[in-house]
Image (cartoon, rainbow, N blue to C red):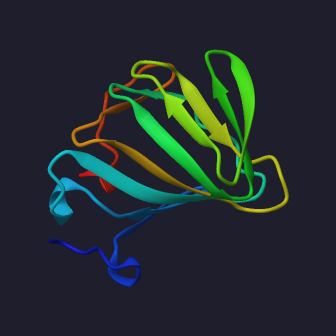
Amino acid sequence: MPIIRSATAPRFALPGLAVTGLAAPSRGARESSVWRLALAAGAPGAPHSVDREEIFVALSGRAIATLAGESHELAAGDALIVPAGETFALSNPGPEPFEAIALAPCGVRARMAGGGEAFCPPWTE
């Protein structure tokens, strides 16, 4: 049974976003990818879509999920289910970091709003 230790899990950084890769095919998973994300205070959302369902479980802080043109606040303990193909963004307009666990099926592909090539987020590979 593969165990991914937080201390040695791969880390990825984008402006305002830090991701820790947990379960993924490169780390022994066959069906699901799981990662931990931290949105910095004041981080804007990056509208995008994914080709498979994606689920977020809020751990701490607050965030705003914009989905299908509607904004929803997420707080610790809340879950967000993003349907495949739906454009969404997750932002943190507040003063504290927002942390969540996210998961999607292995092989999920994302596309930024406005077009561009679909890609596999590196933490899901």
> Looking at the image, which is closer to me, 90 or 32?
32
Q: As drawn, is 18 to the left or to the right of 51?
A: right
- The residue depicted at 18 percent of the width and 72 percent of the height is 2
Q: Is residue 24 left or right of residue 87?
A: left
Farthest-out residue, right: 95
Q: Is residue 86 above or below residue 58?
A: above
Compared to residue 95, the image places residue 67 above or below, namely: above
Residue 46: x and y in percent read 59, 36
Question: Which quadrant, please, contains the N terminus?
Answer: bottom left
Which residue is at a point 61% across and 16% down the rendered structure image?
68
Q: Which of the 4 image quadrants contains residue 47?
A: top right
Query: Could you tell me residue 61's position as x and y percent?
Result: 74, 58
Q: Is residue 46 above or below residue 70?
A: below
- Quarter of the view holding residue 72: top right
**Seen from this angle, which residue lies furthest bottom?**
7
Identity of the residue drawn at 32% across and 27% down:
117
Query: Horizontal and vertical percent for residue 33?
Result: 30, 50
Q: Position of residue 8 (x, y in %)?
A: 33, 81
